Image: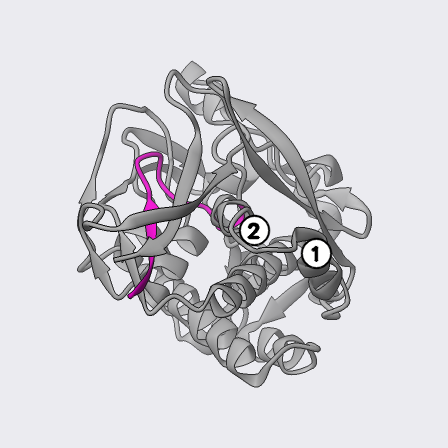
Amino acid sequence: MKTLYIDCQMGAAGDMLMGALLELVPDREKFLKKFNQAGIPGVRIEAQKSVKCGITGTHMEVLINGEEEESLDLSSEEGNAHSGHSHVHFHGHDHHDHHTHQEHTHHHMHQKEAMDGEKPVHEHHEHVHGHHSHFSMEDITGIIDGLHVDNKVKEDVKNIYQIIAQAESQVHGRPVAEVHFHEVGAMDAVADITGCAMLFHELGAEQIIVSPVTTGYGQVWCAHGILPVPAPATALILQGIPCQAGKIEGELCTPTGGALLKYFATEYGRMPQMVMEKIGYGMGKKDFQAANCIRAILGEA
């Protein structure tokens, strides 16, 4: 049986998973061309060689209008290189709420700042607070419907984004219709989710087995104060999935990473008895004592 095993000892983020899966496909350039013609507004991805603890793998760079997310002064990602899921706020409430972002810090501040006790600065968000710079789930769905990808991929992307939106909705006690994602973060997440969905379909594994997910531990800053790791939305998404804190302080699993695993996994556990045929490494951005990567193994069980 064609089997895909995903090793999440260092957590999961959408771009890390995409990098690992990309290394398993026969023609990477063909896939990148196909993705970049899919029509995600302003988005282009590039595969870059990355080395962590002496292991060579692929880091997926998601470019929004030609720039990586952190270069847009919207985040400085020192954790796992992340999938913009959580510049979240809510419409339909008073003026204060309208301009309040509930940010999960894996996108928008240094984990180092949190550990060093320096409160992050949020003033740089003010220039993007207009209605035009945020997307509702309805907006996201419209973008996904317009993509030049298979209908099954579109369906998967919408379902995965719905998992994230429902978790954010439940955490904040607001209806899904009022969840709004920041423009850059939304496009980043659509890119990660679409890329992973396309790759899962291309690989065509009959079973997808995922290791217990390492979440990291400690605390992270958000716009409203300090939150525990895993962040509340991530914790909700990971309900029902075997998890462990691990030995790394910081946030290792993002909402997008967790939602992708939850949606595509057929079971969880250790690698089964299988003949390994191809091995891929998807790299995060930060350097830890342990190799900051997701490992994906394709073979016959």
Question: In the displayed structure, would residue 246 be above or below residue 175?
Answer: above
Q: Position of residue 156 (x, y in %)?
A: 47, 75
Question: In the displayed structure, would residue 199 be above or below residue 201?
Answer: above
Report the amino acid beneath label 1: Leu
Q: Is residue 272 magenta?
A: no
Residue contact between numbered discs 1 and 2, judged by CB atoms under 8 Å: yes
Distance from disc 1 to disc 2, alpha carbons, whole Å, reads: 9 Å
Please report the bounds of the magenta region as a residue range: 1-15
Q: Is residue 119 visible?
A: yes
Report whether 91 appears left or right of 275.
right
Q: Position of residue 9 (x, y in %)?
A: 30, 36
Quadrant containing the C terminus is bottom left
Question: In the displayed structure, would residue 32 be above or below residue 227?
Answer: below
In this rendered view, identify the residue nearer to me: 74 or 145: 145
Q: Which residue is mark 2?
A: 22
Q: Is residue 8 magenta?
A: yes
Q: How many callouts does the rendering have? A: 2
Residue at 27 percent of width and 56 percent of height: 209
Q: Which mark is residue 194?
A: none
Q: Position of residue 104 (x, y in %)?
A: 45, 45
In this rendered view, identify the residue nearer to me: 122 or 252: 252
Report the amino acid beneath label 2: Leu
Q: Is residue 170 visible?
A: no
Point out the tag, 1 or 2, that comes first from the N-terminus: 2
